[in-house]
Amino acid sequence: MKERIIKNNKKIIKYVLIICLLLSIIIIANNNYCFYDETIIKVTDIEITDSSTSSNALGLEEKYSTQIITGLIMNNDEKGQTMEIENEMTTSSVVTETYNIGDELFIDGNNITGLKRDKYVVFMIAIFILSIFLVGQLKGILSVVTVIVNMTIFYLGLNLYSSGTSLVLLCLGESFLFTILSLFITNGKHKKTLAAIISVFVSTIVLFILTLIVIKTTKYTGINFTGMEFLTIPAEEAFMAELVLGGLGAIMDVCVTISASFAELIEKNKSISTKSLITSGRKIGNDIMGTMINVIFFTYLCSGLPVFVLALRNGFTLQNYISSNFTLEITRFLVGAIGIVLSIPISIYISTKIFKREKSKWIKY
């Protein structure tokens, strides 16, 4: 009884400490004006003047207005003083921004350079960390650690690219590092970790080779690289790198799900037959395949949704937009979906071979 009380008290202390840490971070983010050299004002009053309306050839109306913004300077030598600045805005806000009382703005001379959003980002990060800690405990915190580690690897990879490394090879190498570190940090030294890593490697390489063969054979026919005009490298190279990293998350998810399920099945029944394992793997694969493909579809659909809505509003037909702007998203979706389908039999085969062999000296169940 006493041990249980001590354990519960330790858990409560742990929750209180992490909540206090997150609250302190939020408070700092709301009062970090001194960290910026650029002038920051907090909007205290807004007056709208010079309202006018114009229409285009399609008969669509757009309202134009001028905001006279009064704000309190929050940093620098002029802290505490008020300043007034103008902002042009439109109802669609396609190329303009509409500000509200309470917003914090970066000012350069007499121009608004942007909205100060860091406190909102910090608040969302705090909610994310707290939620993942409450749900996943140590595993959740380790997941956050893997994200930070992967971001660091990605940053270092960008530095290597600037020194002349091939972007495609760099992304392939990074994808392997992402997989190894993510799975070892979250799952530790375990057979399911080894099975998932090998499955991800094989699935990624097979998908990359198949995609490369198809794209090189068709010579990128039907793919419109609109939006990549300002790249200083061939668009095809950047596109292949996108496909490698874009499909990695879905492939990793499928492989981890199947390998973890196999580990659970064997833990419950150590005498389970290979045939039963394969049958269970197929059922699991069939259950997650549809949902994972839909996740990828909606992810890429959302990435192009703002431009899609804008194009339809300005008279583009659905067929015209898809052929001219949406081919990249469709290709990414198809490659990711193929990766999901391929990773199911590959992870079933590799997990079966690893779990049904004799116990290794360095990998435990």
Image: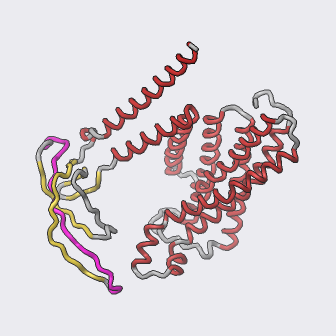
Percent x, y of residue 337: 66, 61
Furthest toward the top, the residue is: 2
Residue at image location 60% in from the left, 76% down from the top: 222
Residue 73 magenta-drawn? yes
| Residue closer to the observer: 267 or 112 | 267
Residue 273: quadrant of the picture? top right
Magenta region, residue range:
57-78
Residue at image location 19% in from the left, 76% down from the top: 52
- Look at the image and name its color scheme: secondary structure
Looking at the picture, does residue 113 appear above or below residue 131?
below
Looking at the picture, does residue 152 appear above or below residue 334?
above
Looking at the picture, does residue 278 appear above or below residue 269?
below
Percent x, y of residue 202: 73, 50
Percent x, y of residue 323: 54, 77
Q: Which quarter of the figure is the N terminus placed in?
A: top right
Q: Report the side of 74 relative to 7 (left or right).
A: left
